[in-house]
Amino acid sequence: MASSVDPRFGAALREFRERRGVSLRSLGQLAHRSKSHLHELEAGLKAPTVDTARHLDRILDAGGVLARLVDAPIDHAAEAGELRARVAASDVSGEVLERIEQGVDDLASSYPTMAPADLLPLVRRHLAYVVRLLDGRVTLAQQRRLLVAGGWLAVLRATVHIDLRQRGAAAAHLRAARELAEHAEHAEIQAWCLETRAWDVLTQGDYRTALDLSHQAQRVAPKGSSARIQATAQEARAWAWIGDVAATRRALERVERLTANLPVPERAEHHYRYDPAKAAAYMATTLAWAGDPAAEQVARAVLTDLDPHGDGGARPRRSASARLDLGLALVAADQPDEAVALGAQAVASGRVVPSNWWRAAELLAKVEQSGVPEAAMLRDLCVEYAPARRLTADSTPG
């Protein structure tokens, strides 16, 4: 079970550490924790356990502040089960407020920019509010709106848990989201559940299962929906890792057709509304994985669009991913020096979430294979910033 962490924990830890003039490395030695682990806590990439919070509190003489920012453990299966049980009982009451739906959109729009550990408590509180409203009986129309809001929040929560590599919690909330979507007869949420599972197993190296889930999502998703486009893009990624370049190209061509006349959504940063600009980013990633020479040109265009001034841009997480994509393409094009520089920028930005770290590890493995001396610098950065895992080719899918 994980802990419920106040999103201010990372900033508080950094404030107490700096107030006492202690570096991350020194604090790591005092606390018997790795520097990278402490960096993740401060950056919101990882949630501390109750014991860790209390330990750091004592070392930094924080007067209990850090410990109070971490609550008792959460039983994710029980939380998801409570929501499902209330739905099954059809015993719902309370008014349906437009601000719930607005809140869902706000949280989904915060996903590309907010650290996962900071976003998780917000999603959890909003979902708990929806659960509280499912206490009595309302009209069928009101009930459905609540169920749909709960479904979106549950699949978003599962996605954030995947980013934090908390796969047990993610599975529990994906099951809850699927059941909510089925109860509300909401095909798009059902499709997003399948697409989210596809992405998760793809990052674990199970490409055939990812391919099957992507196909299921496309069959379930409404025609023209963002879920269908995203599931098609995931299919292309799975084919790329399998090594079937022709199938990869065909899937990417379908993504292009699906997005050809797609308008830019009102909130392009919304995780569940497909922004046409995403198509180019996914193409860059997929072509890089497939080893297609076209990847470099596409990846450069994507990075220029996302980060024209080199400061991370409005979507720093996507910019970091674009740098990794371009780095992989450059290694394939025998330009490892620039690939190292791009990888270093991505890693040092602190915007590579735990579930996506294997992409940085993959780039590191490839530049080291190239024999370029600068690869040592990238390895040092990876050791400093990476989640606690092996930095070898084994860190990549497959």
Image: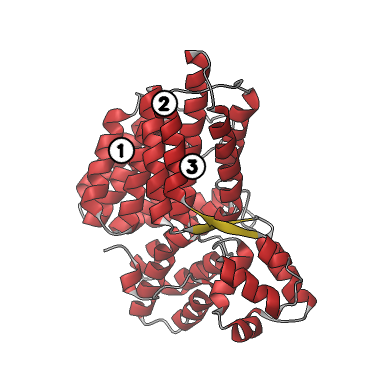
Q: Is residue 281 above or below residue 267?
A: below
Q: Are marks 1 and 2 in contact (CB under 8 Å)?
A: no
Q: How is the image coloured?
A: secondary structure
Q: Is 371 left or right of 350, judged from the image as shown?
A: left
Q: Is residue 294 visible?
A: no
Q: Amino acid at mark 2?
A: Ala
* Quadrant where the C terminus is found in the figure: bottom left
According to the picture, the residue beneath numbered tag 3 turns out to be: 156
Q: Residue 385: name its quadrant.
A: bottom right
Give the alpha-carbon distance from disc 1 to disc 2, as whole Å: 45 Å
Q: Amino acid at mark 1?
A: Glu
Query: Percent x, y for residue 218?
Result: 29, 33
Q: Residue 32 bears which disc, if any? A: none
Q: Is residue 133 visible?
A: yes
66, 379: nearer the viewer: 66
According to the picture, the residue beneath numbered tag 2 turns out to be: 89
Q: Residue 155: name its quadrant.
A: top left
Q: Is residue 274 above or below residue 57?
A: above
Q: Earlier in the sequence, mark 1 or mark 2?
A: 2
Q: Mark 1, mark 2: which one is toward the viewer?
A: 2
65, 35: nearer the viewer: 65
Q: Mark 3, mark 1: which one is toward the viewer?
A: 3
Q: Mark 2, mark 3: which one is toward the viewer?
A: 2
Q: Amino acid at mark 3?
A: Leu
Query: Percent x, y for residue 1?
Result: 46, 58
Residue at 25% in and 37% down:
215
Q: Earlier in the sequence, mark 2 or mark 3?
A: 2
Q: Secondary structure at mark 2?
A: helix
Residue at 39% in and 54% down:
168
Q: Secondary structure at mark 3?
A: helix
Query: Percent x, y for residue 317?
Result: 54, 54
According to the picture, the residue beneath numbered tag 1 turns out to be: 253
